[in-house]
Image: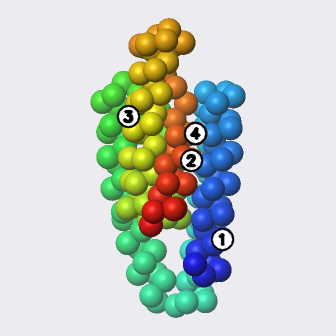
Amino acid sequence: MNGPEAIKHSLVFLLLFTAARTDIREKRIPNRLTGMALGVRLLLYMVGGKLLGKEEFIITEMQLAGTAVLLSGLTLFAICSHHGLGFGDVKLLGAASLYLGTDRALACLFYGLLPAAAAGMVFVCTGRISRKQGISLAPFFLFGYVLTFLTY
């Protein structure tokens, strides 16, 4: 892993860790956090474009297009699931997609939702939460990111 990749992965870990901690405490992911991640990534795109030239802009356009498709799908899912997936989660995964690419962001989602579903079933069966209550998904997305990082 080269320097820019290590920086991106460190920023994603920090973003997901902070989001997970906040989501557990407050049951929400602040817009300020995802907005700051977006601003830092756009700054990195600009610096990368200046240093690397035209190839970086082509990769940037592909990542932006993939992220737009991912955000559209996740937004539709959040609406259809009656906010089972919250818009903070959607924005968090969108920000992660800008750093990791759509394929790795989808892997984080998949690897995170499986243990989240299992934990939710355990919590409901043990009476810790009711069927209508939600659980914080950001910690599971962090788990999914770590798994994705180790397997890609």
Image-based side of 31 in relation to 106, left or right: right
Task: Give x and y (percent) for residue 118.
Answer: 42, 29
Quarter of the image that includes the C terminus: bottom left
Which is more foreground, mark 4 or mark 3?
4
What residue would you read off at disc 3? 78
Q: Marks 2 and 4, how far apart in space?
A: 5 Å
Mark 2 to mark 1 CA distance (whole Å): 17 Å
Task: State if disc 4 and disc 1 touch (CB < 8 Å).
Answer: no
Quick check: marks 2 and 4 in contact, CB under 8 Å? yes
The residue lying at 52 percent from left, 62 percent from top is 149
Residue 43 seen in the figure: no
Asked if 44 appears above or below 138 in the picture, the reply is below
Left or right: 143 as drawn, with respect to 25: left
What number is the disc on residue 139? 4
Relative to 8, is 79 above or below? above
* Residue carrying label 1: 7
Secondary structure beneath dot 1 equals helix
Residue 58, position in %: x, y?
41, 81
Nearest to viewer (mark 3 / mark 1): 1
How packed is label 3: few (under 14 Cα within 10 Å), some, or many (20 or more)? Answer: some
Give the residue at mark 2: 142
Q: Nearer the viewer, residue 50 or 141?
A: 141
> Which residue is drawn at the image coordinates 36% and 24% (left, top)?
82
**Amino acid type at image mark 1:** Ile
Mark 4: amino acid: Pro
